[in-house]
Structure formats: structure tokens, C-alpha cells
């Protein structure tokens, strides 16, 4: 058995400007500012993780991530051997409630180390069904004309699947979709994300109008409030467009409830909602049992944590839809190593672990976040 002991955790910050502001029904953001986690070991190997403080979705903030590490996670991981992997995963998941982004950062750093210990890329460790995936790209909420321009620009960059943010003004949302469909034609897939922006009956009305209008929508993501499982089921039961649960699915238990209720047609797995690869695998397995396909998504994350999602997606065939556009929305890439992102084409790295070699411009922090 390999020996590799966790000796220290360092926390830092990385800032990456976005190419254009990211606007959804919930927020508007111009740059990524994420917490970086490094687990150092006695062999010199470093495991890397990242936690985006997406307060409006996960409830996680920069200081809550730091607190989760300093007061809880560090205590159960330091001094432990990476080879005690299952024990570490159970300890990580039971050392505090919620705080899923902090847990995801620790989880991916541990998978990174475990892969390095046994010299195998994580996607191979998980079953490795493919080494290449294709992502969509997000079009932010704006006026219809601007969204149509952003869409044709994305198609020119090679994207054949666009994720359109809607959900602020129902009537205008239909105009937005019409303008985009007219601009890009029918060879491009359009999926829409309402980010909880509609009420159940309102969602049914709008979605049915979109369908009758021939807008050819591939799927609709999270039409109603995250907690409203019955409302989500109401929409799923009353529209033809497939419904994908996103903010409603954090834990594997949430996923099971939605599967059992048949409240959605598809599930969106994000490492930052479920707390990392260990829990994401449980959601994927539950979905497999129910024959429900999954999307893999991300928050506004740099390549470091999106790279971990790439490994998961390359391993599991039940993940049929990929929404991992974080890195291509960024103006610069401070992450050395990991998957190669060439617009819509993502190729996973065959280096051991998650293949991250380092981060340029990382700013190490103390417990005050400075
Ligand atoms: Mg979403």
C-alpha cells in the first residue's frame, strides 16, 4: 500500500476576469474570485481544489469556505494517510453540515492525491469511458438583440449548443428566444435556464408557448424555486419540453426524492452543490437506476475545479449533457495542467490524479481572508 500523509492545507485566492459580464435571473458578475485549496503531503505531492463562493446558489462565501477548512475540514484530514480514502471521505462529509463548495474543494484535492499515489488519472480510476467531451456555452440575459448577437458570435466560435439564460421577464423571454432562433437557425441546439425565475403555472404557460411557437427548445433548466419540488413536478407533467432540475438537486438525497417523485426529466450534477466527486457518483448511480440522464454543470469556476468535473463526466455515460463553460467564459487561464479547453472541445489529461501542476498569481490567505 502506498504511503502519503496529509501534512498541511494552504488556502489562497485566484482572480480571473470574465470576457463579458455573466448575467442570470439571480446575479450579475464580471470576474471570478475563488478560493484555492492545496493539500500538501509528506511525499511532496500536492492535491488541488477550488471553491467558488456562490452565495446566491450554494450559500457559500469566501469567509465561510475559510472557516469550514480552519474549524472543521483541516482537523479531520491533517495527519491522515491518503490511502485511507473511504475513511477520509466519510470524515469530510460528516465533519460539518452543508458547506458543499468547501467540501467539494477538499474532495477533489483528495481524489487528485489518491490518483497521484497510484499513478492513474482520476477519470480512469472512475471507469474512464471517454477522454473527450463537448460543452455548451452560456448566453447571459440581456436585450433580445444583444443576446442574438452573442449567440451568433458563439456559433462563429464553433459552439453548436447554447444555454440561454432567461427567467426575469416572461414575455420578453419569448422575444429573446425568437430573436436567437432567428439569428442562429435550426442546426444549433438551444437549452434554456430560468434559474428559478418563474412560478409553476407561469412556467407552463411560457414553455408551452415556446413549444407552439416552434422555437425547438432542447430542455429547460430549473423553471421554479429550488425548494418547490411539487411545482417542479407540475411543470414536468404539463410541458413537452424536458425539465432539468438544477438548484433543486444538491445532495444525493435530493436527487433520490426528485427521481422517486418523477419531478424532473433530467438532473444537473454540480460538484459545488453535492460536495464533490464522492457524492456526485451517488447521484449518477441513482439516476442510472431510474434511467434518467444527467447534465454536468459548474458555477463560475476556473479550470481548476471544472477540470475535476471533466474527469467525472469522462467516466460516466449517464452524463450525456455537458455545461462546463466556466473556463471558456474567462479572459485568462491561471491554471497550469489539467484538461485542455478549446472552445466547445474538452480533452481530459492523462496525467496522474487530476493533472493540475500549479496556479499562477495565487494569493495565499490567513483566516481573515487576507
Ligand atoms: Mg442552472
Image (cartoon, rainbow, N blue to C red):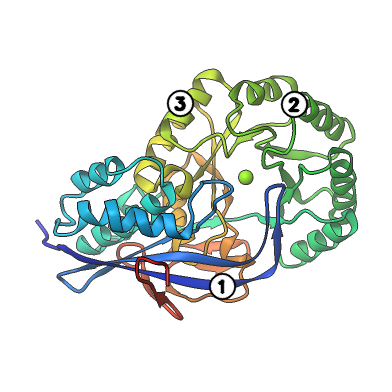
Instruction: Tell me if the residue at label 1 has its CB under 8 Å from ligand 1.
Output: no
Q: Position of residue 299 (x, y in %)?
A: 55, 54
**Residue displayed at 70% across by 34% down:** 223
The circle drawn on residue 256 is 3
Question: Quick check: 166 left or right of 5?
Answer: right
Q: CA distance from mark 2 to mark 1?
A: 39 Å
Nearer-the-camera pick, 15 or 19: 15
Q: Secondary structure at mark 3?
A: helix
Residue wearing tag 1: 16
Q: Quadrant of the N terminus?
A: bottom left
**Residue displayed at 24% across by 41% down:** 90
Residue wearing tag 2: 240
Q: Secondary structure at mark 2?
A: loop
Question: Quick check: 27 left or right of 184?
Answer: left
Q: CA distance from mark 1 to mark 3?
A: 36 Å
* Residue 349 in view of the camera: no
Q: Is residue 67 above or below residue 204?
A: below
Label whose residue precedes the other's in the sequence (3 or 2) = 2
Instruction: Tell me if the residue at label 3 has its CB under 8 Å from ligand 1.
Output: no
The circle drawn on residue 287 is none
Report the image quarter containing ligand 1. Answer: top right
Q: Is residue 206 above or below residue 302?
A: above
Q: Position of residue 314 (x, y in %)?
A: 45, 52
Amino acid at each position: 500500500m502506498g504511503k502519503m500523509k496529509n501534512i498541511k492545507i494552504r488556502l489562497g485566492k485566484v482572480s480571473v476576469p470574465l470576457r463579458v459580464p455573466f448575467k442570470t435571473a439571480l446575479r450579475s458578475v464580471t470576474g471570478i474570485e475563488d478560493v484555492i485549496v492545496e493539500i500538501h503531503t509528506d511525499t511532496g505531492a500536492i492535491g488541488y481544489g477550488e471553491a467558488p463562493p456562490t452565495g446566491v446558489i450554494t450559500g457559500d462565501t469566501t469567509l465561510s469556505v475559510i472557516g469550514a477548512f480552519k474549524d472543521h475540514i483541516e482537523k479531520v484530514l491533517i495527519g491522515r494517510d491518503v490511502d485511507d480514502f473511504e475513511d477520509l471521505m466519510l470524515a469530510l462529509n460528516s465533519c460539518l453540515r452543508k458547506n458543499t463548495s468547501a467540501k467539494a474543494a477538499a474532495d477533489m484535492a483528495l481524489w487528485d492525491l489518491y490518483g497521484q499515489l497510484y499513478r492513474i488519472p482520476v477519470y480512469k480510476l472512475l471507469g474512464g469511458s471517454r477522454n473527450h467531451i463537448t460543452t455548451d456555452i452560456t448566453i447571459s440575459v440581456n436585450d433580445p438583440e444583444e443576446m442574438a448577437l452573442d449567440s451568433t458570435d458563439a456559433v462563429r466560435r464553433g459552439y453548436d449548443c447554447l444555454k440561454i439564460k432567461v427567467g426575469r421577464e416572461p414575455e420578453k423571454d419569448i422575444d429573446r428566444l425568437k430573436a436567437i432562433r432567428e439569428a442562429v437557425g435550426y442546426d444549433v441546439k438551444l437549452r434554456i435556464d430560468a434559474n428559478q425565475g418563474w412560478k409553476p403555472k407561469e412556467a407552463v404557460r411560457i414553455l408551452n408557448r415556446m413549444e407552439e411557437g416552434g422555437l425547438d427548445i432542447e430542455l429547460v433548466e430549473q423553471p421554479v424555486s429550488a425548494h418547490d419540488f411539487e411545482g417542479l413536478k407540475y411543470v414536468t407533467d404539463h410541458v413537452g419540453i424536458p425539465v432539468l432540475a438544477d438548484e433543486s438537486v444538491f445532495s444525493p438525497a435530493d436527487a433520490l426524492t426528485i427521481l422517486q417523485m418523477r419531478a424532473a426529466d433530467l438532473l444537473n450534477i454540480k460538484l459545488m452543490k453535492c460536495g464533490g466527486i464522492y457524492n456526485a457518483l451517488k447521484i449518477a448511480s441513482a439516476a442510472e437506476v431510474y434511467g434518467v440522464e444527467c447534465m454536468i454543470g459548474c458555477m463560475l469556476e476556473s479550470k481548476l475545479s471544472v477540470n475535476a468535473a471533466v474527469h467525472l463526466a469522462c467516466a460516466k455515460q449517464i452524463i450525456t449533457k455537458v455545461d462546463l463553460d466556466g473556463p471558456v467564459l474567462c479572459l485568462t487561464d491561471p491554471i497550469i495542467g489539467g484538461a485542455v479547453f478549446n472552445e466547445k472541445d474538452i480533452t481530459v489529461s492523462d496525467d496522474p490524479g487530476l493533472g493540475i501542476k500549479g496556479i499562477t498569481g495565487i494569493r495565499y490567505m490567513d483566516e481573515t481572508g487576507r
